Image (cartoon, rainbow, N blue to C red):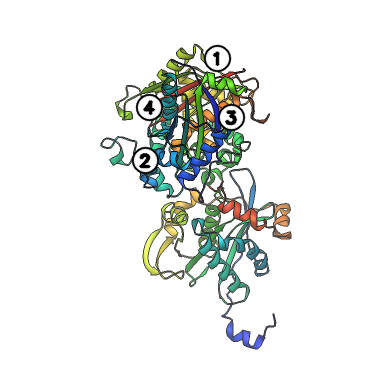
Amino acid sequence: MPVDMELEMVLRPPQIPMPPYPPKTITLANGKVMVIRQAVREDVPAILKSVHPCLFIERDYYDIVSARLYGELLAWYRYRVKSEYCLMGQVDGYLVGIVNGRLENEKVGMSYHTLAIDRGLRIGSHLFAAKMEYHMDYMGQDEVLIVAESPIGFRRWMIEYPLELTHIPHELGGGDSYRLTREIYLKAKQRLVVGDRPVSQALMDEAMLDIKFADDDTIRERIAGLKGR
Amino acid sequence: MRDVAIIGAGMIPFGRRDEDTLMDMLSYASLKALDDAGLGDKSVDAVYVANMGGGMLQHQSAIASSLVDRLSLLPAAAETIENGPASGASAVKNGLLAIASGYYDTILVVGGEKMREVTGWRATDFVATMTHPQAEYPYGITLPGMAGMFTRLYMEKYGVTREHLLAISLKNQEMGTLNPYAHVEMALDRGGIYDSPHAIVNNPVSADPLHLYDLCPVSDGAAALVLCTVEIAKKTGKPYVVIAGFGQATDTHTLAEREDPTDLKAVTLAAQQAFAMAKLKPSDVSVAELHDAFTILEIAESEHVGFFKKGEGGKAAVAGKTRLGGQIPINVSGGLKARGHPVGGTGVAQIVDIVWQLRHELPENRQVKNAEVGLTVNFGGFGNNVLCFILRRVQP
């Protein structure tokens, strides 16, 4: 697509460089090792290929979560958002989950979405925890504003942490935000935030070399199939 | 009393069946069992449907009346049987008695539940409606909560450990990967759910000391059987299964009223009745399907039916005695833990799995070699209504 850079400079909000998130590994319930790492802008087209089949899955609100995530990642790719980041989970190189968010300001984070492409393994929980870890431990923020778009999200974030309800409108839909404060984070960290660092070079090479993704039918079956958990 | 045979067995894969209604699932399973029975144009005399939650979850009552019409089995007699999670075995028992008495010759028994169209919270609450309405339910008790307390007491009294519970989780989920009807087809890794520091997230405490993978999933599913007289079964010319014995017993509604809450008296009594009727003993059993809604229950039931002494069930599981090829293979299907637990369907599904075992028609990696006698325990409430069946293979 031809890009007029003169106009782009007008259209693009200022880009705030995001600090690095050190990758980590997590052993899942089935024994597979998930690498969680920070995505770079160039990863977005490959990530979108895995998000696309989820757009049409109603179960557990995958459609709205993935549609919004798709738009947010595209906005990041096209420089239409000023402070977005994306973390991703990979198993054997395959993309199994994505989380993203951005900075409301230096001290307040805005959580966007959590999408688990493989299910029944707490991948969403691990990735959401990594997102909170990024905001608190690596960006030094004081709080993160969060909403849930599905009952599963509500259970995993609002209840399990537990988060506190505020009357601050959230960027996703304008409803009341729930808030993860540093105090809540530190209390929950012991039981919800896990992972091993550093990641071996072999695992990083596998993850970085190529983002593999399952075919559309496999993704749909994993999320909305008979064996869905 | 006439002997009663099983000539038809059918099941649909358990899981999240969003596209199917409860009636769809009951119909599919019924048709499979009727096809398997090979009755041809002959109809059945009666249809017994086991279901616990149709009235609450689907807002549908008189399910058997609906099913008999949908299956074009009119004017067969039809009844819905609700007995909590023991509904399935209760329906089989009622079918058995109706044929044994000489009143009916052929009966379709089908059990099923559609639980995944509500959230997990609603499903847990629905199951909790079987607790005592004044002494337990108002205080927020759930079945996992009861199981957690039971497990703690069992650990203290009999030395059961998390290692023992883990052996059940690993075994049953491994077997589930081999069962195309199982809801959960994922083998667990010991490191992922127990040894590694990451297990705290992967396998969190659900009801202390029980963790997530100590609990069965909430499932949609259905299973069906065709019961008949032995004379009819003989005419099929195929191996068939007879119900050699059954037993049923009840216990106090509230756990707190039991002299010893770790003593599952109803399991013991039901098994004793079944063994006495069958003129068999625990060591005669080739394969068993026990009601492992929680891992502790497989251990406790394996002791209460007499496979192992009290306090030995967990050790036996760790030693591999309950695996395929072991002393007494238990829950080769994956059990409730992996096959799933659509509450009204479970008691029927257990018997379907045993029928397949006794007809020697399962793949080698799931078939108990030379299986001749099978046992099931269907555990209602928290052991306040339990049914035990003993089935025997007959080679015509």
Find residue B236 and report its image quarter. Answer: top right
Of marks 2 and 1, the one in the foreground: 2
Q: Nearer the viewer, residue A58 or B235?
A: B235
Cα distance between the residues tagged 1 and 3? 17 Å
Q: Chain of mark 4?
A: B
Question: Share a chain, discs 2 and 3?
Answer: yes
> On the picture, is A43 further left or further right than B154?
right
Residue visible at 56% across and 80% down in the picture: A13
Q: Chain of mark 3?
A: B
Q: Residue B25: percent from the left, percent from the top? A: 50, 43
Badge 3: residue crowd in 10 Å (few <14, some 14–19, many ≥20)? many
Labelled disc at residue B385 = 4
Question: Share a chain, discs 4 and 2?
Answer: yes
Cα distance between the residues tagged 4 and 2? 23 Å
Q: Earlier in the sequence, mark 3 or mark 4?
A: 3
Q: Amino acid at mark 2?
A: Ala
Q: Is residue B353 visible?
A: yes
Q: Nearer the viewer, residue B192 or B267?
A: B267
Q: Chain of mark 2?
A: B
Question: Share a chain, discs 2 and 1?
Answer: yes
Q: Amino acid at mark 4?
A: Asn
Q: Secondary structure at mark 4?
A: strand
Q: Secondary structure at mark 3?
A: loop
Q: Indicate whether A21 appears above or below B66.
A: below
Q: Are marks 3 and 4 in contact (CB under 8 Å)?
A: no
Q: Secondary structure at mark 1?
A: helix
Question: Share a chain, discs 4 and 1?
Answer: yes
Question: Share a chain, discs 1 and 3?
Answer: yes
| Residue hosting label 3 | B332
Cα distance between the residues tagged 2 and 3? 34 Å
| Residue hosting label 2 | B62
Q: Residue B258: percent from the left, percent from the top? A: 32, 24
